[in-house]
Amino acid sequence: MKFSQEDFEKAREQLKLLKTDPGNQVKLNIYALFKQDSARQKYIELVSSLVAAESSQVEATPPGSKAAYETLEVSTKDNITKIVLNRPKVKNAISTKMYDEIVEALEEAAKDDSVITVFTGNGDYYCSGNDLNNFTNLPANGLEEMAKNSADMLKDFVDHFIDFPKPLIAVVNGPAVGIAVTLLGLFDVVYATDRATFHTPFSKLGQSPEGCSSYTFPKIMGVSKATEMLLFNKKLTAAEACSQGLVTEVFPDQVFQKEVWARLKAYGSLPKNSLALSKQLMRSMEKEKLHEVNSQECECLKGRWLSDECMNAIMSFFQKSKL
């Protein structure tokens, strides 16, 4: 039986009229079903992209390119491994697949012959943070299993940034949100275009800080400024982020790529082992502390994800997005 858009909207309104709350897990299942209208189209697009990608690989493999990723573009040139977040249609939001692929890319970059590793984004955004659609992919045992699995995944993800042995540089090409911002405290250098913004709206979503930001942000910018960002959702301009120490340097957007990559190319010519050892000296004393903070943040988030505050905020997001 085929249902019209009118039927769909009517069902959404009826859901609001239920006298008994069906519970967070049922509501997440319902919102997950909202997405299935586009399943066939997504299937066609995915198959088409796979065919196109395979054809292009057969025709030519770009020099320095890495193994194929679904959500990233990874390449090495001039002794620089470049990891590009590549979901521009959703502002490079980090899906579960992207989390896994970033971990894989970091493991490969740690072992390759490159001198430095660079993160940037494809399109107008650097990264819009965690893809909230991750919350609709419920495992068999429901919300509690999802919260545990997500916390374990996040802990491993952040651990890879803490332990990364080479200089790690962020080239922030546009707005950054959530974990894309909190992780910056674990990078060694952060360059940003002047149109970038930095936003950590955790309390709006009933969540709490991650990426070791509860430790790194107060240390970088002071407790008061960190509180404005992490508790009260203050969005920083690139200039503000630079003045507070989160960003190393800001460049005019029209010359951003040219000037930054010229500088990075020069960094790539420096002695590899010298850089790695110098980073180790600067970072090793805090590694244990950072791992401890990461564990505490993930444990806190596990509880937050099961809370009514968080679930209601996510439901509100889905409704506004008309999923």
Image: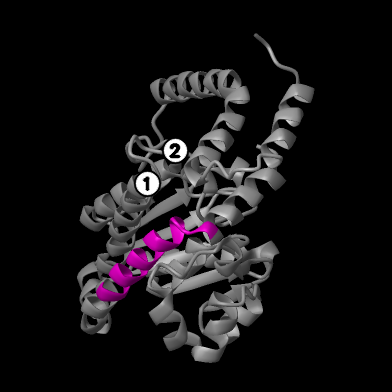
Determine which of the numbered discs, if any, sits on residue 165 in the image: none
Look at 38% across and 41% down and name the residue there: 142
User: What x and y, as percent, mark residue 94?
Assistant: 48, 49
Whether the residues at callouts 1 and 2 have beta carbons within 8 Å, the answer is yes
The secondary structure making up most of the magenta span is helix
Check the image and name the residue furthest to the top: 1
Residue behind mark 1:
146
> Mark 2: which secondary structure?
loop
Q: Dot 1: few (<14), some (14–19), or many (≥20) neighbours within 10 Å?
A: many
* Residue situated in front as seen by the camera: 254 or 97: 97
Residue 283 in magenta stretch: no
Q: Quadrant of the C terminus?
A: top right
> Mark 1: which secondary structure?
helix
Above or below 171: residue 322: above
Look at 57% across and 81% down and name the residue there: 242
Residue type at tag 1: Met
User: What x and y, as percent, mark residue 62?
Assistant: 41, 36
Q: Would residue 200 be visible to someone looking at this image?
A: no
Look at 24% across and 76% down and name the residue there: 287
User: What x and y, as percent, mark residue 24?
Assistant: 51, 46
* Residue situated in front as seen by the camera: 172 or 138: 138
- Left-right relation of 114 to 31: left
Stretch of the chain drawn in magenta: 292-308
Residue behind mark 2:
137
* Residue situated in front as seen by the camera: 234 or 303: 303
Q: Dot 2: few (<14), some (14–19), or many (≥20) neighbours within 10 Å?
A: some
Residue type at tag 2: Asn
